[in-house]
Image (cartoon, grey):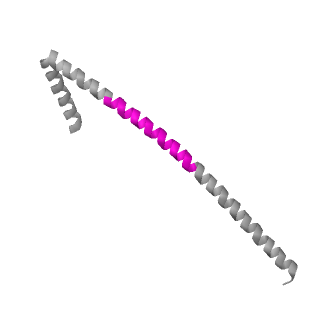
Amino acid sequence: MDNSTKAYGKEAMSAAEDAAERLKHKANEVADRAQEKFGEAYDEVSARASEARDAVRDYANQAADKLDESLKTRPMSTLIGAVAVGFLLGAIWKR
């Protein structure tokens, strides 16, 4: 091999190494951005789930309070209503 061929081979190898390094750097940037976006999405979903959980808990507490009040003021009506709901749920469940 003559010197010009060796020099060309070294230049080509150097260019390939530079391209590989740039590609590696770009891949790391993309991976970092993806990880950041995933973290943001996770935080948002977590916050919304927490809000939904709190809303369900508040609704359940309100329903329990209303049932408690109903039991105190109209015990027979509440009992009849509970039996009717139980009967309907049982009929639906059986199907």
Q: Residue at x 80, y 75 (%)?
A: 9
**Looking at the image, is 95 positioned above or below residue 24?**
above
Task: Give the quadrant of residue 60.
Answer: top left
Locate residue 10 relative to residue 21 in the image: left or right. Answer: right
In what quadrant of the picture does the C terminus appear?
top left
**Looking at the image, is 48 positioned above or below residue 75?**
below
From this viewpoint, which residue is outermost toward the left? 76
**Looking at the image, is 49 positioned above or below residue 77?**
below
**Looking at the image, is 37 positioned above or below residue 70?**
below
Whole-percent x, y for residue 61 in the image: 27, 27
In what quadrant of the picture does the N terminus appear?
bottom right
Whole-percent x, y for residue 74 in the image: 15, 16
Count of numbered labels shown in the rendering: 0
Task: Give the quadrant of residue 91.
Answer: top left
From this viewpoint, which residue is outermost toward the bottom? 1
Whole-percent x, y for residue 65 in the image: 24, 22
Residue 40 within the magenta-colored segment of the rendering: yes
Q: Residue at x 23, y 26 (%)?
A: 64
Locate residue 36 relative to residue 71 in the image: left or right. Answer: right
From this viewpoint, which residue is outermost toward the top? 73
Q: Residue at x 63, y 57 (%)?
A: 27
Q: Main secondary structure of the magenta part?
A: helix
Q: Residue at x 13, y 19 (%)?
A: 75
Name the foreground residue: 58 vs 81: 58
Residue range of the region highlighted in magenta in the rendering: 34-57
Residue 83 within the magenta-colored segment of the rendering: no
Task: Give the quadrant of residue 85.
Answer: top left
